[in-house]
Amino acid sequence: MKKKAVVVFSGGQDSTTCLFWALQQFDEVEAVTFNYNQRHSLEIECAAAITKELGVKHTVLDMSLLNQLAPNALTRNDIEITQEEGALPSTFVDGRNLLFLSFAAVMAKQMDAKHIVTGVCETDFSGYPDCRDVFIKSLNVTLNLAMDYPFVIHTPLMWIDKAETWKLADDLGALEFVKEKTLTCYNGIMGDGCGACPACHLRKSGYDIYMKRKGVNV
Ligand SMILES: [Zn+2]
């Protein structure tokens, strides 16, 4: 029987690495992107371009209701991205992964896919409770009970840091692809980004650490 997977896909570094990982692990892979009026519609375009290039079927689901529920810096242009020491960043949306993974599961069951892949990570834990491994395991049980279906949620990035995520992309033969074609920057600049926002800092420091480990000067 063919193994099918749905990848929760944003077009960023993490989920693109997960997409390459899934393409290696499963016979059939589809990607789902959630549109919740991200700051940059470029994110959706970027996700569409990546899946097109990789020949992966791509579905964009409208989740604009998230903005109605929880106005925050990711979805509202009038709120600045800030992070106080030890507090959740203003990009936080309560329950976002809970909602996204639940919708992904509904979609996955319809296409006979047992496997759901998400790039959540506990290592770079920025305080998002629904990125924790214990939450994912709990949700996995809940989804199986809710839909009477043997889902398996895969989190290839759960215990690795940003440098190791770059290594994973490299091992999958996708380092350049991920570096050039993904969008992580909060200011909507593809590839290496603006270089100044928190997402760019995290991405670059991980890349530099990995290059150093690899013995490459950057
Ligand atoms: Zn940036």
Image: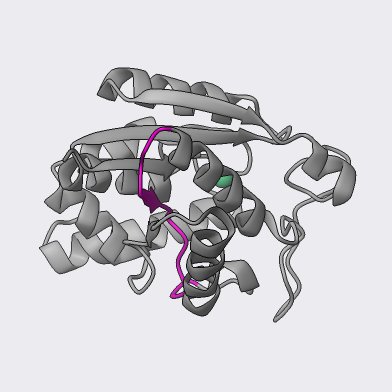
Tell me which corner region of the image, top left, top right, bottom left or bottom right, holds residue 123: bottom left
Question: Any magenta on residue 119?
Answer: yes
Q: How is the image coloured?
A: one colour
Indicate which quadrant contains ligand 1.
top right
**Image position of 113 with respect to 171: above or below:** above
Where residue 164 appears, x then y in whole percent? 27, 65
Figure quadrant of the N terminus: top left
Question: What residue appears at the point 74 percent right and 76 percent down from the top-left corner?
Answer: 87
Residue 98 visible:
yes
Q: Is residue 99 left or right of residue 206?
A: right
Where residue 65 appears, x then y in whole percent? 81, 38
Question: What residue appears at the point 70 percent right and 81 percent down from the top-left corner?
Answer: 86
**Image position of 173 with respect to 50: above or below:** below
The residue closer to the viewer here, 88 or 154, is 154
**Image position of 65 with respect to 114: above or below:** above
The residue closer to the viewer here, 204 or 130, is 130
Residue 185 visible:
no
Where residue 45 appears, x then y in whole percent? 52, 21
Question: Any magenta on residue 199?
Answer: no
Question: What residue appears at the point 40 percent right and 33 percent down from the top-left corner?
Answer: 111
**Image position of 47 with respect to 198: above or below:** above
The residue closer to the viewer here, 20 or 112, is 112
Return the residue found at the far front: 148
The residue closer to the viewer here, 194 or 53, is 53
Tell me which corner region of the image, top left, top right, bottom left or bottom right, holds residue 29: top left
Tell me which corner region of the image, top left, top right, bottom left or bottom right, holds residue 213: bottom left
Which portion, as a residue range, is magenta?
111-124
Query: What secondary structure do most residues of the magenta stretch adopt?
Result: loop
Where residue 81 appears, x then y in whole percent? 75, 53
Q: How many marks?
A: 0
